[in-house]
Amino acid sequence: MEEKRLKNWQKMTPVGRIFHSLGIFILKRKMGQLFALFFRTIASLFASNHNFRNDSRNIILQTFFTGIEIFPPLFTVATLFGTVTIIEVISLTGKMGMSDFVGNLMVVALIRELGPILTAFLIAGRTGSSLTTYIGGMVINSEVDALATMGINPIRYLVMPSVIGGTIATIIMNIIFSSSAIGAGFLVTKGIIFITGNAPNVQITWSYLSAEILKALTLPDFVFAIVKPLVFGIIITTNACYQALNIQRDIRQVPKATSRSVITSFLYVVLADVVLSAFYLISYMQNLSMMI
Amino acid sequence: MLDEALRLEDVYLSTSELSGTPFSVPRAVNYFENIKASQNNEDRPLIAGANLTLKLGETICIGGPSGKGKSAILRLIAGLARPLKGHIYYFGEYIPAERLTALEVAKRQVGYVLQNAALISNLRVIDNIALPLRYHRVGTEAEIQKKVNMAMDLMRVRNFATMFPHQLSVGMQKRVAIARSWAMDPKLLLMDEPTAGLDNYNRRNLLPLIDNMRTMFKTSIIIVTHDLMIAKELDCNLVFLNDKKLTEPHSFDYWLHSDNEISKDQFRDLQANSNYF
């Protein structure tokens, strides 16, 4: 009987065989499995027995879990980072006589690049790792198996709320990061100037800073403030769930998978950032030629 | 065929399938990889050529020495492990190996009580029992509540409804797990060591419940156990896992009084004072 089935499988048309081997080739790769997991997550939203109330409750819970847990470190990092950037940028541009570019530099440094990246890193370190340990622990205790035998799709019950909630939280946190980096960063800069008697030799007012930044903001900045954390959030949460569900029944695999999830999330986030930044390449070039 | 709850035909299971079910990987990949692996190298199968037929409403006990793959057979039937070869029919319907997943099997109302009860640890007992009902939306909230209360009353865990699984003892967790499976109205129930960790009193309470389930709801039950007295008390057939195969089903008394290898191993102490029975 087995031989017969094998033959049936091998009895495909040449075109079918090409597609089959291509599909297996892609799905055997880690990247292919990650994409497959993401698409299965999206597909599970539209499963036949979807329960909107339960789902939205799980998603909101996950959003709050991600957002509230990450807020204190994120706010601290954003404020201190914003302070450093403001002081560096203002003093540097003052020295080099390029005060016109204060806003541009701030937007590029804080809003375009480092805001989303640092938010993604913090979320990968906090939420990604906790997701991996949480789902990994469930895998070890065979709770995921129990869910599946009860007819509950683990991807729908565990992965889908994490991915959607985590992504929403990443978007919100990115906006909070950017605004608190500029707003709270400005306040801390003022405080430093007040305490040290203007030791950094920085002349700055809120009207000047905000006007410069608003002048430098363009429409793509607003779009990418949503698109970048969206992509990063999907990458981090999907990767965390993928690493967790991949754990074989061995307790030592949980810490390994956790560190792997965080490190690979960093890598993928930076790679995705490079790909997304290709859009800005043209405007960077223009800015460079203007500067030169 | 139509009056069968389950039929295993010449099933092979490799040990590599037991390392867990990776839900992150599409199952088709595993399937084709498995075929390739089984062609390439000589895999030592855990189960080789097992046959089993279970009639609707029938109860069967699977016994045998530990470490021979009794629980693996239940994992196989529940769809958590995939057979290398062979055919599995659920209620007369054949599911090919490439589509055999736990979700697919669960759609056919097959319940599974795991060896470690595997309750969801961040949910209270009441939510654990209600979880599959709410997920599948089997009724309104009031109906679900009624059903959950009934299940909790049956298994005597009503007093612990608002406790978390880690606050319960192992035996109590097992009772909650059985209640969770019962609430789903399974047509075929797989139980892995239901009486392990239960005291004599609760064991004697559990057995009539199993008896009720098969008489009232016509549930077919497979019990994997070391406690062979269950077979006598439930008056059901016993199957042993021997030499990577399942033996023919026979009654408890047949095994007790026959003088083959398995009976000598498993019933030695019972045979010694068999005049007691």
Image (cartoon, coloured by chain):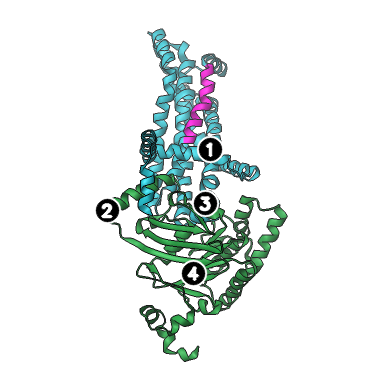
Chain colours: A cyan, B green
* Residue beneath disc 3: B104
Residue reaching furthest to the right: B142
- Residue B86 within the magenta-colored segment of the rendering: no
Q: Nearer the viewer, residue B11 or B14?
A: B11
Residue A253 appears anywhere in the view: yes
Q: Disc 1 versus disc 4: distance between alpha carbons? A: 38 Å
Q: Disc 4 versus disc 2: distance between alpha carbons? A: 34 Å
Q: Are marks 3 and 2 in contact (CB under 8 Å)?
A: no
Label 4 CA crowd tier, 10 Å (few <14, some 14–19, many 20+): some
User: Which is nearer the N-term, disc 3 or disc 4?
Assistant: 3
Q: Residue B1 in the image: state x and y as whole percent.
A: 53, 62
Kind of residue at disc 1:
Ile
The residue tagged with tag 1: helix, strand or loop? helix
Please tell me the numbered disc located at residue B193: 4
Residue numbers of the magenta segment: A217-234
User: Which is nearer the N-term, disc 4 or disc 2?
Assistant: 2
Q: Disc 2 versus disc 1: distance between alpha carbons? A: 38 Å
Q: Nearer the viewer, mark 3 or mark 1?
A: 3
Kind of residue at disc 4:
Glu
Q: Are marks 2 and 1 in contact (CB under 8 Å)?
A: no
* Residue beneath disc 1: A42
Q: Residue at x 71, y 56 (%)?
A: B143
Residue A263 appears anywhere in the view: no
Is residue B225 shown above or below A153? below
The answer to which image quadrant residue A266 occupies is top left
- Residue A233 within the magenta-colored segment of the rendering: yes
Same chain for labels 1 and 4? Say yes or no: no
Q: Nearer the viewer, mark 4 or mark 2?
A: 2
Q: Are marks 3 and 1 in contact (CB under 8 Å)?
A: no
Q: Residue B7 in the image: state x and y as whole percent.
A: 48, 62
Same chain for labels 2 and 1? Say yes or no: no
* Residue beneath disc 2: B41
